[in-house]
Amino acid sequence: MAKQIVKMNLNGQEIEQLVDSRTLLVHFLREQMNLTGAHIGCETSQCGVCTVDIDGESVKACTHLAVQCDGCEVKTVEGLAEGGVLHAVQEAFYEEHGLQCGYCTPGMLMTSYRLLQDNPNPTEDEIRIGLSGNLCRCTGYQNIVKAVKSAAVKLQQKESATA
Amino acid sequence: MNAPVKTLEERKTELQGMGDSRLRKEDARFIQGKGQYCDDIKLPGMLHMDIVRSPVAHGRIKKINKDPAMAIPGVHAVLTADDLKPLNLHWMPTLAGDVAAVLADEKVHFQMQEVAIVIADDRYIAADAVEAVEVEYEELPVVIDPYKAIEPDAPVLREDLAGKTEGAHGPRDHHNHIFTWEAGDKSAADDAFATAPVTVSQHMHYPRVHPCPLETCGCVASFDPVKGELTTWMTSQAPHVVRTVVSMLSGVPESKVRIISPDIGGGFGNKVGVYPGYVCAIVSSIVLGRPVKWSEDRIENISTTAFARDYHMDGHLAATEDGKILGLKVDVVADHGAFDACADPTKFPAGLFHICSGSYDIPAAHCSVKGVYTNKAPGGVAYRCSFRVTEAVYLIERMVDVLAQKLDMDKAEIRRKNFIRKEQFPYTSAFGFEYDSGDYHTALEKVLDAVDYKALRAEQEQKRNDPNCPTLMGIGLVTFTEVVGAGPSKICDILGVGMFDSCEIRIHPTGSAIARMGTITQGQGHQTTYAQIIASELGIPSEVIQVEEGDTSTAPYGLGTYGSRSTPVAGAAIAMAARKIHAKAKKIAAHLLEVAEGDLDWEIDRFKVRGNEEQFKTMADIAWAAYNQPPEGLEPGLEAVHYYDPPNFTYPFGIYLCVVDIDKGTGESSIRRFYALDDCGTRINPMIIDGQIHGGLTEGFAVAMGQQMPFDEQGNLMGNTLMDYFLPTAVETPTWETDYTVTPSPHHPIGAKGVAESPHVGSIPTFNSAVVDAFAHLGVTHMDMPHTSYRVWKKLKEEGIQL
């Protein structure tokens, strides 16, 4: 199997790795980089438990090749907290009971993170539509929606505090 | 300066005990991507297993050619049933007293059945090798319809059972018949029907569905050939039972088998059974002497590991003209697929289906369930419910609605009239269940008031009379009772092991504690809520109580988490273990305070000398003393183990109401309102209870409105990916309103009944009731699920409804 050199910025670190050209990003992250936060749930892009952020877009890592990330900036759930401080979406999911088994959580967090980057003050409908590529079997989404709203407020407060 | 004296309330609050909505202890790892699920486990030298599966639903295996697969670099082995035969592992016992093929032995019985396994260096090579294995099949006639399966000339599905007229649950009267199980009193029920002025009947099919947790099944098996020890990480809801089964199958002594259920990405019944994939990974590790990982993909998950339901039911009610129910009869044909691999207590091949008299005082009742083989995957697990309770609740709630329609009675009124009354508890049903406690009338009125039921009915009436109204409005009402917490070991066992559960608590010298349990959380939040029970019992803050589950080498033996049994059974074990510690702590406190035990009173977190507020010892003081100055004659240390064998099941109940608006043009259903009142007895963590209810309602919504596993005549499963199988997103999922009453269980140490499954069990018939109600004025009494827009649209056309 042909191997390729892939360079990317992964959670703020410049990395260079040799990968099989057919290796999926989710397997690259989980098995080669030991970042097991992104999970595997369907292999058909339906469930979103593998969601990561690539160059400012939410991407499902189960249907994306690692080699496609050459030259990209990739952020996974492991890169959300900075300097040991949880990101607002992480805090909010915890405070609003936005998770149960935890399997969808990394993907939900990454989609929520991107959603709030793109739309800092979303309505409930916008949140629900924004999360519609991420399935959860445990929570019924109600507390997840609350968590995203709460995270939006937290981020805005942070923004105004630093402004 | 002395610290300010804390008030009683402050001391109680600091414990975060029962009733506190404390945030979850498990979340810190999950929100940072640090959970450890099965597929996250990576061991040195680990190989990957993948499975060659049958494309046909019924066929004879003519030839298997492994050579092309073995020729692929990185492939270590390809194994078939013939390789397992010398080990006698090509078949395995099921939990239901049948056997199931581990790898297909000469014949395949369902599409996607396991035919061979490949072991390779990585999952990509393993997948290549699966493609390379060549298998020739001779196709045989396929049986999909369970009624056709028991026709005299139906093809023989299980040749391995030829001539076997006695099954695990009584006589077999046909080659595709598994069992016929009955409960209640047939002649009493027949008598009731013979004389009743009103009778109604309804046929209904509860479709085959799949629990479909987001994490599929998998394991990492690691056999150490030097020590002869087998360690397996497994997505199991019942690790201890798995250890017993693995030991029995493999011959490795149970003391050298260690099963670890790590973090589990949802179970919902899908992870109760022992599947061929697990067995094959274990065998492969033993044979190759290296760790072997198996991770199911989604298509394999939906196609093969443990479906639920698939009950074809005929319900009959007998009643007076004013709606008092006199008798119930139910006949079920249960499609169990190719092997009887239901996960039920041994003596109950149809689980606890005989809870089907529901919340109603029905004097005479009888049910009969006939289990049948077909060319479908085996299973029949309890999908977020106690064993077959969802089917039972659906049946009785549908039948009561059908009767109400026949008598032109209101749904609420007929329920009021037939409820078991508060003063009748403990109440023994016609099927012999002893309902522990309930107050259905109070709960019903609370819900009807909350939603202004009269106004809803008036609005519906007005809309029905308005030909220009673009929607049909339906109101669903369900008043269900569950039976959970299996169960008393005198009647409930799994493979001969009684269905008790267990807890071991150790209090450390500095006053923190660890509790180990026989259950295993899959999202329910045990690490949070179990600690709360101990906090309230022993006065130790929840924050310093660690809860561990899932490792059979450290946890006491328990039967696991399914059938809402964690709180009813393990929750009770915790309280009882804590009370043993409490009793010992009291002796130590009396010793330290130099008074008699009888002079001590317990107060939140301390024993104090009666009449002297200044004289007390906190649990932390006592813990220290237990390790350095126990009273003479008392052994040091402060710990206890309790195995709790429940005296009875618990009977949570709920009143659910749903308002649906159906678009007359498209058949789309919009859930306008869903109000769920649950009574789960004592409430441990209201935040978690609400979360469990939201999740259960959403799963119920999925089942009622979209989930099904349809098969074509060739036995092809039409839709086994998440592109086809309906899991609702945040967009379709309604907003839930929750409410509660509290009727504690009188026989449970803390009065708790269990809650996580009620919303699934109760909501499915509620959605159904609402959709049917939208058509009720047209004389429609029943519509089978799922209520997809297309199916509802077809019904609109059938009834001549248009915009």
Image: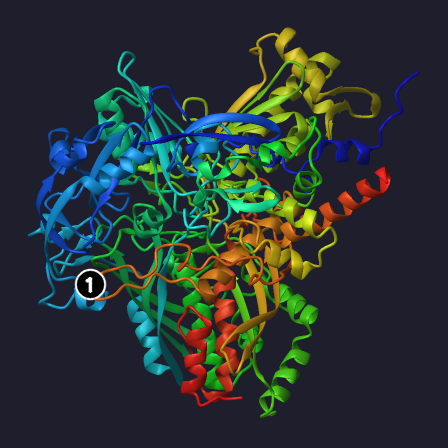
Total marks placed = 1
Tell me the SS state at disc 1: loop
Q: Nearer the viewer, residue A144 or B98?
A: A144
State the image coordinates of residue A18 (x, y, percent, origin top left).
43, 26
Q: Which residue shows up at 71% across the image and 16% down it?
A: B621
- Res B362 visible: no
Q: Which residue shows up at 77% across the image and 43% down it?
A: A154
Up/down of B464 relative to A87, above or below = below
Side (left or right) of B676 relative to B223: right
Q: How is the image coloured?
A: rainbow
Circle 1 Cα neighbour tier, 10 Å, few/some/many (<14 / 14–19 / ≥20):
some
Q: Quadrant of the C terminus of chain B?
A: bottom right
Q: Nearer the viewer, residue B564 or B609?
A: B564
State the image coordinates of residue A100 (x, y, percent, origin top left).
56, 43
State the image coordinates of residue B470 (x, y, percent, origin top left).
58, 85
Q: Which residue shows up at 78% across the image and 20% down it?
A: B616
Side (left or right) of B548 relative to A143: left
Q: Amino acid at mark 1?
A: Gln
State the image coordinates of residue B389 (x, y, percent, origin top left).
42, 57
Side (left or right) of B290 relative to A136: left
Q: Chain letter for mark 1, please.
A: B
Up/down of B304 relative to B786, above or below = above
Quarter where residue B127 is shown: top left
- Res B607 visible: yes
Quarter where residue A90 is shown: top right
Up/down of B99 relative to B349, above or below = above
Q: Which residue is mark 1?
A: B714
Side (left or right) of B316 relative to B162: right
Q: Quadrant of the N terminus of chain B?
A: top right
